[in-house]
Each structure stands twice: as structure tokens, then as C-alpha cells.
Amino acid sequence: MHWNHVVALISLLLMSPLTVDAAEKTCRGTEVKELEDGCTIINKDPLIFRDLKDEALIKRKTETISIIDHGVEVIETNIESFDYLKNATKISNKEGPAIIFRKNRKLKRFNFGGLKYLKGDPVDVVLEDDHFSSEGSSSSQSFHDWMFLEHISRSTHQRTEKCSKQFLEVRTTKESSDEDFKIPAIIAMSVFALLCILCVGLTIFCHRTSVEKNDKKTTEKKDEKNKTKKSSEAGTKSLEKSKSPATETPTKSKSKSNPKSAEPTGSK
């Protein structure tokens, strides 16, 4: 029985690496509807989201993806919310942006809830003639999605600077210069920069306020201690003063009575 346990344990140890390898499936990037099922790692080419009419098919193709090494492109869709990569933990690209949103006409939200690593070259995220440019500056929910990606980008690059140029680029192409993308893009960038400045300013203000409150509390405590000390000293002094006459009175009365008692009775 003992040897059976040993053999089973050895077999388990030998088989476990094979099981892990079998669970990983590396696929070449392509349009998502043409992707193989069960892919966990996407490399060599970008993963492209273009025709997303068959939502069930797209979700089945993307639900197992955790790592994308050659970027993601979301192009010319009619969706309002992009949540097909919420299980992805890493999106990177050494030859371009990690994520590109291009000419999506209705995009308002995106969900990358599982993301831990975001890195592109030279920028991480690009919005090109995209509806999200205007939505991100007018909707608090869209801005929240935006700032989540900014946080992941900042954490990946290990930088303290918020809203870095390395995180986001908003582009308007020549083809769309006569359309309604250019002005919203400028507004989006301006609002984004302004909100970042406000966030930084608010953080500094809160920190200073907290420090001032702590200093005020410390000063008040010191004042209270000083007042208590002074009052105790004053009480001690008053107590000493009240005691001193009582101790002197018997001495004086005694000294006055002594001369009389010292006079001889026969002198009268």
C-alpha cells in the first residue's frame, strides 16, 4: 500500500508539467472570428476585432485568452461596449501600440478588468478617429474605464507621472479631417489633461490638508498640556500660600506671649 502511494505521487509530479503545457495554446494573431478555439496566448500578429455581429462566436473565441504579445486592434465596429478581453492579464506590443481603437462609431465603454500589464511602443493606447474620444470626455463611466487603463499603464512602466504621453495618443487622419472627429479629439485630450491636473491637485490638497490638521491637533495637544501644567503649578503655589500663614501664626503668638511670661511677678 505504501509503494502504491509513492508510485501515484511520482506519476502526479511527472504529469503535472505536461498538464500545464497542455492547457496553454499559442495562436497567431488574426481576425478574431477566424481564431482557433481555446487559444490562451496570441503572438506574431495583432488580434483584430472588426466584424462582431456573431457575439456568441466572438465570446467563445476570446474567453480563454490571457496573453496578447502583438497588440489588439478594434476597428470600425458598431458596438457600444467592448468586453471581450476582460480575462486577459497582459497586452503588449514591441512594434506599435498595445491597443488601437479605430473608427468605432458607437464605442462608449470597454472592460479590461483582469489586465495587469499594458505596454506598447511608443505609446500604449491609440484612439484614431474613434467615437470614444468624445465619449471619454463627457461620460464619467467612460472616463473611469479610461483611467483604469492609465493606472495599469503607469504600474507597468513603474512611473509616478500621471497621464503620461507614453500612455495615450489621439489621432485624426487626413481622411477624417473634414468629419466630426477632430474637434472631439481635441476636446477629449484637453479634458483628459485637465482632469489629470485636477486629480493631481486634489491629491496634493488633500495631503496638505491632512498634514495641517495633524499639525493643528499636535499644537492643540501641546497647548492643553501647557495649560494643565500651568494650572497645576498655580494650584500648587496657591496651596503653599494658604498653608504659610497658618504655620507662622502660632510662632508669632508664642513669641508675643513669652515676654509677658518671662517678666518677674515681683516687679509690680
Image: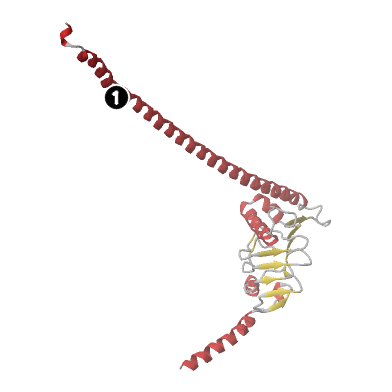
Q: In this view, does 109 lie above or below 48?
A: above
Q: Is residue 52 above or below residue 136?
A: below
Position in image of residue 249 (x %, y %): 28, 20
Position in image of residue 141 (x %, y %): 61, 54
Q: What residue type is labelled 1?
A: Thr
Pick the residue in front: 218 or 146.
218
Colour logic: secondary structure
Q: Is residue 245 above or below residue 86?
A: above
**Identity of the residue drawn at 49% across and 93% down:** 4
Position in image of residue 165 (x %, y %): 75, 54
Position in image of residue 218 (x %, y %): 51, 40
Q: How crowded is mark 1: few (under 14 residues within 10 Å), some or many (20 or more)?
A: few
- Residue denoted by label 1: 247
**Identity of the residue drawn at 55% across and 86% down:** 12
Q: In which quarter of the image is residue 32?
A: bottom right
Identify the element where label 1 is drawn: helix
Quarter of the image with the N terminus is bottom left
Q: Is residue 230 above or below residue 141?
A: above
Q: In which quarter of the image is residue 104?
A: bottom right
Q: Residue furthest top?
A: 268
Quarter of the image with the C terminus is top left
Pick the residue in front: 109 or 176.
109
